[in-house]
Structure formats: C-alpha cells, structure tokens
Amino acid sequence: MDVIEAIKERKSIRGYKPDPVPRDVLEKILESACQAPSAMNTQPWEFYVLGGEVIRKISEVVVSKLNNGEEMKPEHNVTGWPRESVFRERQVNLAKGIFKLMDIRREDAEKRAAWMERGFRFFDAPAAVILTSDKALTETGPLLDLGAAMQNICLAALSFGLGTCIEDQSVLYPGVIREFAGIPENKRIIIAIAIGYPDPEFPANQLKSDREPFASLTSWVGF
C-alpha cells in the first residue's frame, strides 16, 4: 500500500477483534511515529502503550467514573464546535451515520449510553497508545507536532492490517491513565489512539465518513 492509498483508506475503527497486537509490531509503528516532522526538530511526543490487564482495568475504572457522574478533568483542549456552523453539522452527520449502522434510535437512551461507554473504554481495542507531552512546554505548542506523529501511527498501522481510532473519551479522566500507566505528573496527557485488528462484522466499521472536496477548501494564488 503506497502513501496516497493509505491516506485514502484510513478510517476510524470502532470495533476490534480480541486478538492481541504483538509488541514488535507496535514497536515498528512507533518507530514510524518518531519520523514525523516537528518544529525545529523538538520532537515533543512521548508514548505510553497500553494492553492486557492494564487497558482492561483502565477501561473499567473510567466507565465507572462516567456512570457515577464524576467530573471530567482533561489535560488537553477539548474540541468544541459552534452550534450553527458547518463544523457542528459534520459532527452531527457523523453521529447519525454511526447510529444508523448500529441501529441506535434517537429516543433509545440505553443504547446511546452503551455507545458512549464504548468510547470511554477504547472501543474495546486490545491496545492503545497514549500520546503525551512535557508540561515544560506550552499546552498548545506541541499539538501540531503530536498530530503529525498521530497520523504516522494511523497510517503505519494499516501496513500491518491494523485499524485505529483517535479518541479522547478514554483520557477525559487522566488521573486513571496516570495511575495505571505510571505516567509522571510532569507529562501532559493529550490523546489516545485505540489500535487492533478490525472486526469486519462490527456495523460501525462499515462507515467511511465524507470529506469535503479539496476544490471547495482551496484558493489558488499565482497559478
């Protein structure tokens, strides 16, 4: 699979087989992540890879906190969209597409809650990569660089038959991640990437979200 094909084929996977991901495969993926560009070669990313009993326990505790209504205390900037905007419209359309595939009706509070739980437990992936940066850096400064590393992880995973889902639900209770993964206080927890072998039978995995054509987003100057 060449780079252009991988970019076009990548999509969010929200249902995984239970098969564990070999450590040597994850090492090769993270090696690719570290080849990402960064401002003045600062390389502000650090990774914590979760699997086995650790990811299971984190998922269990995070979901418990969610269901008990405990306050979320994210260490990253949580994305928000103006209600009357194309950005909000795209987010709503994505949710509608997922709920249609998962047969979750608008009025079905139980199924909606169950779907939310799934995101908070890494979509039941057998592994996850937590991306962090050092708190000596500004909160927003490293984000572009971490985004480049994040994309490399998702693209490299495809070459090993793996799927990924970039998601922040599971790090909205960062204290849980910090405790079980041994992340020191001087590291800022930014985002999680669920990773594993896609379950082809899982309905939501059939979704390929729409993309705005580049022509409508591009201004040509001097051509």
Image: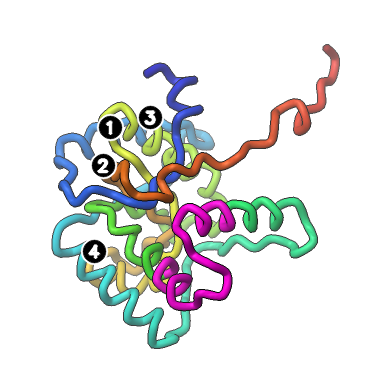
Judged by depth in the image, the label closer to the viewer, 2 or 4, is: 2
| Residue range highlighted in magenta | 95-116
Relative to residue 166, is residue 153 depicted above or below? above
Q: CA distance from mark 3 to mark 2?
A: 24 Å
Q: CA distance from mark 4 to mark 1?
A: 26 Å
Query: Badge 1 is on which residue?
Result: 161
Query: Badge 3 is on which residue?
Result: 35
Instruction: Name the spot of residue 20 as percent of width and height, x first.
Output: 16, 47
Mark found first going from the N terminus, 1 or 3: 3
Mark 3 secondary-structure assignment: loop
Relative to residue 31, is residue 186 depicted above or below? below
**Residue 193 seen:** no
> Pointer 3: residues within 10 angstroms few (<14), some, or many (20+)?
few
Q: Is residue 124 left or right of residue 82?
A: left
Judged by depth in the image, the label closer to the viewer, 3 or 2, is: 2
Mark seen at residue 29 = none
Mark 2 secondary-structure assignment: loop
Q: What type of secondary structure mainly makes up the magenta span?
A: helix
